[in-house]
Amino acid sequence: DLDKCTACGVCYEKFPGCVRFTPGLDHRAPTCMRYPRTTPRAFSIDMEKCADPAGLEACCPAGAIVLDDADQTRREACGAIVLAPGAALFDPSGMDNFGYVDQPDVVTSLEYERILSASGPTRGRLERPSDGRRPRKIAWIQCVGSRGLQKGAASYCSNVCCMFALKEAIITRERFGENVDATIFFMDIRTVGKGYERYQERAKNDLGVRFVRCRPHSVIRKNDEDTLSVSYAPYDGGELATEAYDMVVLSTGFKIAGDVREMAGIMGVELNEHHFARTENLNPAATNRPGIYVCGMFEGPKDIPETMTQASAAACMATAHLGSPGAVVRREEELPPERDVTGEAPRVGVFICDCGNNIGGVIDVDALTEWARSLPGVAAAEAVGHGCSGESLERIRRVVSEEGLNRVVIGGCSPRTHEIKFQDAIRKAGLNKYLLEMANIRDQAAWVHRDQPAMVAQKAEDLIRMAVSGVSSARPLVERALPMNKDVLVVGGGVSGMSAALCLAELGIHVYLAERSPELGGVAKNIRRTLEGADVGAFVRELIEKTEAHENIQVITGAIIVDHGGMPGMFRTGMQVGKQMFYRQIRHGAAVIASGALPHRPSEHLLGRHEAVMTQLDADAFIDDAPDTVKTWDNVVMIQCVGSRCPENPTCSRVCCQSAVKNALRIKKINPDARVFVLHRDVRTYGFQEDYYLRARELGVIFIRYEADDPPRVEAAEGQVDVTFRDPLLDREITVTADSLCLSAGFEVDDEDAEDLAMIFKLQRGEDGYFLEDHTKLRPVDLPIPGFFVAGSAHGPKLIRESVTQAQAVAARVQARLSKDEIQLDAAAARVDKEKCAACLVCVRACPFDVPFINADGYSEIDPARCHGCGVCAAECPAKAIQLTRFEDDRILAGLEGLFERMVA
Amino acid sequence: METFEPVIVAFCCHYCAYTAADMAGSERLAYPPNVKIVRVPCTGKVDAIHILKAFEKGADGVYVAGCLEGDCHFKNGASRAARRVAYVRKLLDEIGVGGERLEMVRMSAGMGDRFAETAKEITEKIRELGPGPVRMAALSEARKAA
């Protein structure tokens, strides 16, 4: 009975044989509570193994073990179904060449993850499963069970393994430093996600992770040896090599489990040839059955940000079936009344997270807790493990009530991301949520001072002391509520903008769609077909028609955003519209940035100066428009990564490898005799795109690698171009006289436009120039400013289908936000002490938003509902008559006092 | 005498420098632990009194880290902060603390590396300047008492 189980572990202690709890490596045993933070948090029991059922039932102190709890059949009526069953891991047992079954030191990447984890079987110590010795050399082998044709492997690319291998190698090098060598054996490194290319560069250049391009053929342990021998044939045709490693990690891919396929069968959901859900090419959440949607791995291998995005997208699609928005019932939790703490002496509770090894691996959390208990004003101090986990939050709530605490300090991560969780916890304990302070000992100590163990503990103490001292001066605050404007402004009329606008309009929300150019369509208007063959032209035309015809959408073309103001929930954005540039202001409660990116047109390789040279985007249309010319081509050369993955633009443009494969296949279809050369650095046909890469190779398209420091050279040869490159297999230079040269030029940020939007809306851009989301994994389509969201290539290079998914996700997020009638504003606001105010007008002049005015009584008045909470007036006020709540002078000064107490002592 | 470890207070704007510090964290960019961050909603909120108090309590250096020109979430808070910092530097010169111990720096939220670099540079600079006069006085008093 899940409601009763408290995961106390008594049953596990008494009946270890039949209770399934294996927090570790033994994936071959039935493992249901695989790690300590499972949800629901309960043990599961394998009755077949239990010899004494009555004893088992009796041992549970909560009475949660129900012996006759057999399967039941229930019927539920619903308006829509979202399938999110996920994928299973590929089991490498069948690949005897890697020795997974009989070599304990050959582990899967998930098992290695458990070894690194503080809650894992080794408590985060790096030990070999065979003898507990610290390994000195570790090898990662990529594409185990993916991109293969033998021994049960799948032919597709599992998409995320390159990143998790990189992550594991980086963590290993960071944590165990010079003592552990990390080598990754790979075929292509596919770091196509946002910022991933930079991550890879860092692994290579800063952390000394070694990359070997090849697929090892065997891992064996010779009888007399302690180490594993990894044998491989180097990519560039060198001698067969064998290297010794202490541990080998297999980067296993994903597949769809049998029970999921069965479920799909029952639902009548079609699967593709790889047994993943078959979805519409340009609407990836929709299955063949109306009303049934999919998200996550079941739709195709994907990483966490993409999974989160698709989950929101599926929610958006499903909501459309649920009738009026009123059908969605919002459950409000009953909260206890707030306790009045005025006049009480501070009783501070300090709760310190270990954040797994993030903090726990660097700082002695128990010692820090012990120390914190001795601070003045501290009534309780506890180490809480992962403080943000459900049970720790509950623990915090309980301690706050039981100990009668009136202030709380969390020693953990950043208030930017997690404050709200802890605020909720103390609010549930009856404390005003502003009686909380977070000491960011993770981001500001553990993560950045790990190289100075002596100082890191002291810094953590300093931060906690500052927080305790500061929070002691904290006052309870009341939040202000404002009416929410229910309209939405979408900036950008490409596929992402239109898709988001249409989804919102279908949900009954009024949308203003502002497009800078005179017409809708964006970059996709120039694309004819997707890799999978969908007709992009027809798709875009239909989108435009629907968008223009929808009664809830007002399209404003030729609109240049010029100013922006107001508050979250009641924004005002001004734009100049049309040739006459007349000014128009729109009021809206949320905004979607879908301003896209530009197709890159670098001047390299004679682009723009020779008729035979074009970009993949040009080629896309050319192949459609001039098949007769394509028929005359003997040689076609494509160069990848032109203007991407280079010092000027380190980002991988994500879409170019599949564009090259797509265009190569289309050329081959029209002219099977044409020789097509694709010069690449890695072929990044992630996910099911791999199928098309394989097909291209079967049809004779030649893929040749070049090194970044030795790029192909292009010279004009009358109507043709000579392309010279080094073939690594032949180890010699080759010149191909090409009838056509297609450059995979990818995307570039429209710097001027993005900068304008960033300035006007106060949005943040990452180092790559794309808009920075609030949280990569947890809030991938939210921007850091409440009420702002991002979709499409404005967030990073993307395929059309990925942009559509993101647009749908944004629609779901916007709808959730606008479903409330009021918006709660942050309690930071300026307050005037009228006794001190001399009506000098300094605040009136200083306020960036013209809020303060001198009222009839002769002192400055600041409307808290209109105050943005910046505190400029408070700093400027010569009489110190203004205080910014939450950041009062005495609270800031108390924090400083706390910091310097150590030095006074 | 043991090596001098300066204490440096960094008033960081929530929208840029504080976020940049988080970025430095998630990118694991090491910087000296001497820098302690005080989060403010906008650097425009940093009052002369906060800076002076920090020095009075014993800070060896202070810097105010706000948004890039034109990026300020509150229009012009960071520019006001820059003017105020220039003013407080003069005050510090006059009272003998030395204006060079106070700085205004600007960065955007994405600049984790810039945050770490700035922290390094300022720590090195203050290390070269030596302990602040308030710290010096406390130290010599402690020595006298001993």
Image (cartoon, rainbow, N blue to C red):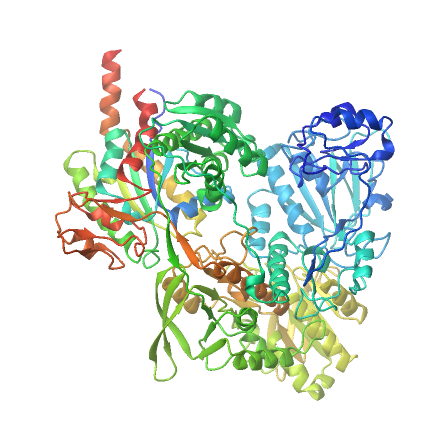
Residue A372, percent from left and from top:
44, 24
Residue A490, percent from left and from top:
47, 69
Q: Is residue A112 above or below residue A314?
A: above
Q: Residue at the bottom extreme?
A: A628
Q: Is residue A867 above or below residue A485?
A: above
Q: Is residue A121 above or below residue B2?
A: below
Q: In this view of the protein, which residue sits in the foreground, A643 or A793?
A: A793
Residue at x 67% of width, y 80% of height = A739
Residue A589, percent from left and from top:
43, 64
Q: Quadrant of the N terminus of chain A?
A: top right
Q: Residue at the top extreme?
A: B146
Residue B33, percent from left and from top:
41, 33
Q: In this view of the protein, which residue sits in the foreground, A192 or A629?
A: A192
Residue A30, located in which quarter of the rendered image? top right
Q: Is residue A333 above or below residue A135?
A: below
Q: In this view of the protein, which residue sits in the foreground, A256 or B57?
A: A256
Q: Quadrant of the C terminus of chain A?
A: top left
Q: Is residue A615 visible?
A: no
Residue at x 65% of width, y 60% of height = A681
> Along the horizontal axis of the image, is A773 left or right of A641?
left
> Along the horizontal axis of the image, is B54 left or right of A113?
left
Q: Is residue A694 visible?
A: yes
> Along the horizontal axis of the image, is A476 left or right of A663?
left
**Total marks in image:** 0
